[in-house]
Image (cartoon, grey):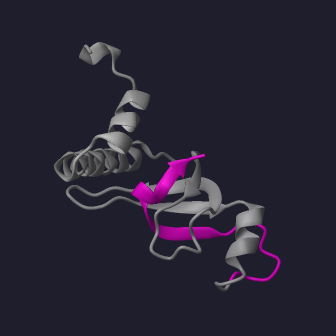
Amino acid sequence: MEASTITFDDVLAFVRSQATDADLERFEDTANKRRRFLSKERAKNLAPGQKVRLDGYKDARLNGLTGEVVHVDRQPRKAAYAAVRLDEESTRRLANFRHVPEGEKEYTLTRLAADGCHPA
């Protein structure tokens, strides 16, 4: 089979039925490198006004919240951080576990790791 004719489904079939432990380790290493690359690219391309969904944060209660980027703080050789103004539904959900001023329809979270802001 030529490399140009191998599909992703072919790769999955190989992993499910024939891959050895060594093959799986190589596959996992490659997948992790790709995830790190995509994470850096996502943070690099984040811009004010962009609609995002939060994901990958240690505080799992933040994951799934949605809103709009209002600011991105980038400094050389450091992680980028974002401020995200949550939409009304996400502000309501946030108020279940964090103080949000009463009657607030939109709430801004600051110092969010930018690589956790996924395009919505």
Image-quadrant location for residue 91:
bottom right
For the residue pair 57 and 13, the one nearer the viewer reads as: 13
Q: Position of residue 73 (x, y in %)?
A: 39, 58
Which span is picked out in magenta? 100-120
Residue drawn at the location 41% of the way across and 46% of the way down: 42
- Of residue 88 and residue 96, the one placed in the foreground of this image is 96
Horizontal and vertical percent position of residue 48: 53, 48
Tell me what residue is drawn at x 66 percent, y 86 percent. Answer: 99
Residue 65 on the magenta segment: no
What is the quadrant of residue 54 in the picture?
Answer: bottom right
Hey, which quadrant is residue 90 in on the image?
Answer: bottom right
| Along the viewing direction, whichever of 45 and 28 lies nearer the viewer | 28
Q: Is residue 109 left or right of residue 42?
A: right
| Residue 75: % across, % down | 28, 58
Q: Which image quarter holds the N terminus? A: top left
On screen, residue 118 versus residue 30, left or right, reads right
